[in-house]
Amino acid sequence: MATGRRDYTWGFLSEEASEGRYKEQFIKYFNTIVFPSETKVVYEYNIPTGKILAIYRVDISCNSGVDCRIITAVDLTTEIDRFFSGENSIIFSDKSPRVLQAGQNFRVIFYNLDIVDVQFIGLVNALLMDVI
């Protein structure tokens, strides 16, 4: 008589067998200094052929007490244009992320509106998936 755990379960399909092998966590970190009155593209990503990118959130912070400006753009078209000081999050939502298709270009652009150098730190949290 066999004892122990069964090596199968009826009706169970592992994540890897279904869609897990077709997606990967996409987390990109950026940390840069932006000079006074400068505009800088701090992150840029071109979605490769055969993939889609689902962006869930972009977290940003700067060490300035003065308002800074962030723009997220897709293919040179402004999507979000926001002023902030300190920390901010751009949340697209788990249920409706911003989905970019293959060949599209995603940019995060910072504007330093202060009279001193400002350090910008950010994080893009997304899911990169194969087109099936």
Image (spheres, helix red, strand yellow):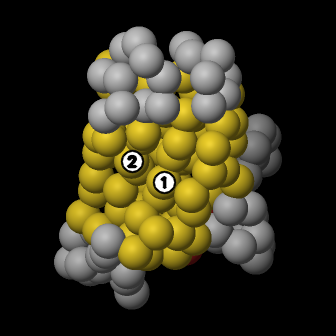
Q: Amino acid at mark 1?
A: Ile
Task: Describe residue 78's horizontal placement relative to residue 60 as left or right.
Answer: left
Q: Is residue 7 visible?
A: no
Identify which residue is drawn at 55% across, 14% down: 63
Location of the C terminus by quadrant is bottom left
Q: Residue at x 66, y 36 (%)?
A: 84
Point 48% across, 54% down: residue = 71
Task: Categorize mark 1 by other alpha carbons within 10 Å: few (<14), some (14-19), many (20+).
Answer: some
Q: Position of residue 2 (x, y in %)?
A: 75, 46
Q: Secondary structure at mark 1?
A: strand
x and y percent of residue 118 in the render? 43, 17
Q: CA distance from mark 2 to mark 1?
A: 5 Å
Q: Position of residue 128 (x, y in %)?
A: 42, 62
The mark that comes first in sequence, 2 or 1, is 1
State yes or no: discs 2 and 1 in contact (Cβ < 8 Å).
yes
Q: Is residue 40 left or right of residue 112?
A: left
Which residue is label 2 attached to? 109
Residue 18: quadrant of the picture: bottom right
